[in-house]
Image (cartoon, rainbow, N blue to C red):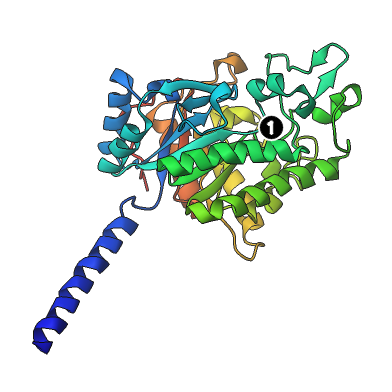
Amino acid sequence: MRKVFVLAIVIATFFTFNNIRASTHEWKEPIRGIYVTASNTQGPQFKQLLNLVKETDLNAMVIDIKDDHGNLTFNPEKKSSYFRAIRPVITNPKELIQTLKKNHIYPIARIVVFKDNVLANAHPGWSFKTSQGIWRSSRGDSFTNPFQKEVWDYNIGMAIEAATLGFKEIQFDYVRFPEKFEAIEGSLTYSGKNNGSHRVAAVTGFVKYAKEKLTPYGVKVSVDTFGNATVIPEARGIGQNFSQISQHVDVISAMIYPSHWTSNFGITKPDLEPFRLVEAYAKVENSRLKKLTTPPKSRPWLQDFTATWLGKGNYKVYGKQEIEDQIRALHAQGIDEFLLWNGSNHYTVNVDYTPY
């Protein structure tokens, strides 16, 4: 009888271990993903995106849960406090999560933080104001105030909604003040001190606080940063200090699109030299992360779009070669994770995502 009992324990332990191992390896590392808008999580384009990930070495999707306007993109539970912000483009979020899980696709929830027209309009006092009302950028975007803890809690609450839904990672984007804020801050009314070091403290403080609040939910936390914030001591205007933010996240995702640089690293026209640009950036990033006691995983955003706005002679059509060049450049510096950005989700076909 004792032998039967021991045998039963061994068998149970074996299956338990293997279930844990299966769960642990449900999403294979390294993580390599694409950006997906909420509107493309259903219909024919979603099927195309799903097939792209299933049939290649990609294995993740970054999906808008709080979008660039501040909308929550699915219907939360009835007790949620976010109904005034909903635009339920994702009609069946639980089914979406199950589809991703079934296809072994790592689900990342993108939460756009401080760029938020919805919250700024609902709470003008939590935003930046001019004599005419809420400040808006030339594109019509409003930002909420990173000094306001109410804004922190509001965004973290949405992140918790995503974690509860089943997303395995929360990716915070627009974790910053508006671009060139230092040039306009004198004309604005808002709570907080108009000083670069205070802005850095506010942004870093939010990231640290968010990580603490999300820990009980078992999700990873990642933050998108400007690529330029990595190669200078800190971007005080927008409040991003790459090293400080990196101390409080599991993953750091710098946006290093070649089209977004201007004569950096001695490269006159960066968009024309994706390998050289990405390799030069990666060397700088590695040197900064190595100085941290517990550095996060690096998972940069790469370019899968053509920057025609740069003008003739300053850009090139990005296709298979250009995307593989960026991946090769990362790998040459020991970085094996990445995300691909295309705003309309039309990704280049026949790309080798492990062109080593």
- Against 62, is 40 above or below? above
- Against 144, is 157 above or below? below
Question: Mark 1: which amino acid?
Answer: Ser
For label 1, the residue is 263
> Left or right: 141 with respect to 22?
right
Tell me what residue is drawn at x 29 percent, y 25 percent: 48
Asked whether residue 190 appears in the rendered view, the answer is: yes
Tell me what residue is drawn at x 40 percent, y 43 percent: 166
Task: Estimate the x, y position of residue 64 in percent, counting from the top left.
Answer: 48, 30
Task: Estimate the x, y position of residue 175 in percent, counting from the top left.
Answer: 66, 37
Q: In the image shown, does 285 or 219 lie closer to the viewer? A: 219
> Where on the picture, by quarter, is residue 199?
top right
**Residue most toward the right?**
186
Tell me what residue is drawn at x 49 percent, y 55 percent: 334
> Left or right: 185 with respect to 285?
right
**Residue most toward the top?**
132
Q: In the image shown, does 317 or 155 lie closer to the viewer? A: 155
Task: Estimate the x, y position of residue 59 in percent, counting from the top left.
Answer: 34, 42
**Pointer 1: residues within 10 angstroms few (<14), some, or many (20+)?**
few
Q: Quadrant of the N terminus?
A: bottom left
> Where on the picture, by quarter, is residue 350?
top left
> In the structure shown, which secondary structural element does the residue marked by tag 1 occupy?
loop
